[in-house]
Amino acid sequence: MAGDRFARIGLKGGKMAREPKHDVLFDAVRIGPKQTRNRFWQTSHCAGPGAERPGAQAHLRGMKAEGGWGVVFTEFCSIHPESDEYPYTSARIWDQGDVRNLGYMCEIAHRHKSLAGIQLWYSGGNAPGLESREVGRSPSQWLSPLFATRSVYGYEMDDLDIQTVINMYVEAGKRAEAAGFDLLEVSAGDDTLPIQFLEPRFNRRTDAYGGGFANRSRFFVELLQALKRHLGDRCGITTRFEMDTLHGPEGVEAHEDGVRLLELLRREGVVDAVALKIGDYAEWGEDAGVSRFRKSGWMTPFIKQGKSALGPNIPVVGNGRLTNPDDMVALIRGGVLDIIGAARPSIADPFMPSKISEGRLEDIRECIGCNICVSKFQQGGQIMCTQNVTIGEEYRRGWHPEKFTKTKSPCSVLIVGAGPSGMECARVLGERGYTVHLREAERELGGHWKSIATLPRLAEWSRVISYREIQLRKLKKNVEVHTGVGPMSADEVLRYGADRVVVATGYHWSSDGRGANYGPIQGADASLPHVLTPTQVMQGKEVPGKRALILDGDGHFMGIALAELLANRGKEITYVCDASDVAEYGVFTMESGNNKRLLFEKGVRTYCNHWVERIEPGGVRLTYLYKFGPDLTGPRAGAVPRRDNGGEFDLAVDAVILVTSRYSEDRLWRELKARKAAWAPNEIQAIFRTGDCKAPVQLNQAMWDAHRLAREFDSPHPAYPLPWIRERQLWGGETIPRLGDSRANVEAE
Ligand SMILES: Cc1cc2nc3c(=O)[nH]c(=O)nc-3n(C[C@H](O)[C@H](O)[C@H](O)COP(=O)(O)O)c2cc1C
Ligand code: SF4
């Protein structure tokens, strides 16, 4: 076989031991009647499964328990149909059906000796109720600021409503206990009810629950007292408290009500642990901070203040994209927190605690802070992660982030292109026992991603490459990496001697201004000195003159990163996009607010809903995309059947950067496909394409494609995904509840 011609050198690294300085991370911590097995606590985070996909929910959290997280939480879990966030997927603990479904998650967590936590969530007047159609209760009545529809209202609670909602929490807590949850966490952040009572901007009451701090905090304390009374001897009662909503005095300020509230909870003895966060729901990217704007540990000053208010006896959980065990130890030793909270680090690497415990620090797959995970929730989808493409696939595809099935039919594989997708494909094929040659035209690994990581604020994104580079080095027994070999021709590929070939040659930017909905732009030609693609800018092509225009049809990070890069070089920047928002995908990654702040601070002039019609040396003609009138004037041929109201104007600029759209770099693939008759004579069984070479999608998706291909490389048709488990109700099965069932009575009389 051709594979025999591939060299086999080196051995994978041996077992290592934990560094004693990290021992403290593995201390047990008491949380009321329960005890954690270490200090690793996966804070609540959405992932898409809710209570509707019990297999995905259980195996996603279970994988983290297996990977060493001592505590694993659900995502936010609605306690009652009045708090219905649909189409955003929360867990729900509304009835016995949810008890059964979420019970499976607890079972798996317990199998790995971890505690299972549930975040009890009631959002009252912020809940859109799009499935349940019920209306929530709130301290006061207001138009919810959270939903763009501007149509969500709740109703103001009277004393009986207050008691009723407390009953809802208690009943939900009892169901959670029945499901097997060890920790009941009251959400007092993200604009949920306890913090609505606390925040003056939401609480305009004049009775015993409104006005001064003592009144505004009353509901929260009474709620925790009730949970303690009914469940505190069997479950840990905790809260997730947003100790600064970043709204100034109209919200919660850390120095003021933040500290006051925590001192009150300590005095009242109503919590067994507190997990702290900052920000609010409208801009929860301040809590789940992207690496572009927040470096690891950015919440530390707030958490430190919270810990000092709570004192030594109430364990504090703190987050901040913590991936470095030395930093974690410093936070514990420095008295900032007691427990390492993590959402994204646990998504990017469910086995981070085990790797720290085994001293395998270089194997940690560190979160890059890109918030693709956040964006998929915000889009109503299932979780995806740039670093860990197996997240969410644990149950439905049976993928394990650290384990790979050895192939029964080993062969040699040539991978052309060592961008992130080629590297991921090589890594997984290597783990599976294939003999792999990964060949890269450039001198370094990483393809387009290595230039991207040099753009302003994106340095952490290079972790995508460095993690895979280290893993490939460890696989050198059967994976060879060849860099600086130049582009391969089809003849070279055919003659190379591999049994199978994977083409992973990436993408290129449009050089003529083609974007979503728009054809080439007149005068757009990246071979001219004043017109540039992003790749040309990153490769050092001179951006002439003082005034540069960024034309962003891509809408993710590239346009805004280049705007900042060139502004930092002293250019006057005009940013133009066809969307209604700058860097529109930031709405999903929760970067939108800070993107706007950034552009404003840098003095960038922005035109949303515009496009460039014509480029000439020294200027462009811009068009307002809604220049046509609302009434139809057609039908007519050769023109839009609406009145043209003008809306075009000229702008003097010296350079135009076309961030418009991308195309697969698939010339090699197409040529190889066209020469299929030459495969067999050259002993080639099959040739595949993957990643951006197939479609220039987001990196997480491109790498997922490469990973999947490698996982299913020995399936009958590896180019196409095998079926996966689709969790949905099959017709004829039981429903819980059934029509006619009564609902648990929580109404106070
Ligand atoms: C995808 C995603 C979903 C989240 N959902 C929740 C949630 O349901 N409830 C909550 O309190 N926090 C939620 N968070 C916030 C995290 O628990 C955490 O506070 C935040 O991400 C910062 O911590 P990290 O740097 O460890 O990720 C979510 C975070 C992510 C990334
Ligand atoms: S998607 Fe990005 S931010 Fe989210 S966990 Fe993965 S690497 Fe981190």
Image: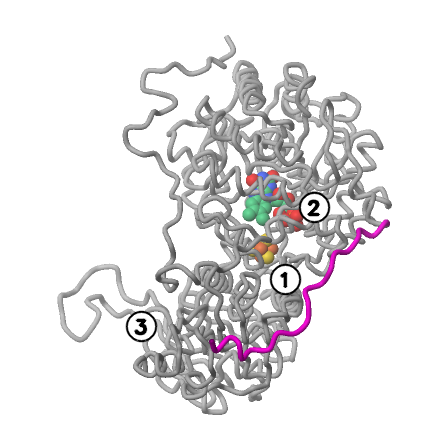
Q: Main secondary structure of the magenta part?
A: loop
Relative horizontal placement of residue 636, taking residue 399 as reference (left or right): left
Q: Which residue is mark 3?
A: 646
Is residue 496 or residue 600 the one in the foreground?
Answer: 496
Q: Are marks 2 and 3 in contact (CB under 8 Å)?
A: no
Q: Amino acid at mark 1?
A: Arg
Q: Which residue lies under the disc numbered 1?
A: 292
Tell me the element at label 2: loop
Q: State the separation of the CA atoms marked 1 and 3.
A: 39 Å
Dot 3: what SS?
loop
Q: Is 157 located above or below residue 419 in the figure? A: above
Percent across and percent down for residue 520 are: 34, 80
Mark 1 close to ligand 2, CB under 8 Å? no
Decide if residue 287 is in sight here. no
The spot of residue 479 in percent (x, y) is 59, 71
- Of circles 2 and 1, the one toward us is 2
Q: Percent from the top left, x then y, of residue 480?
A: 59, 75
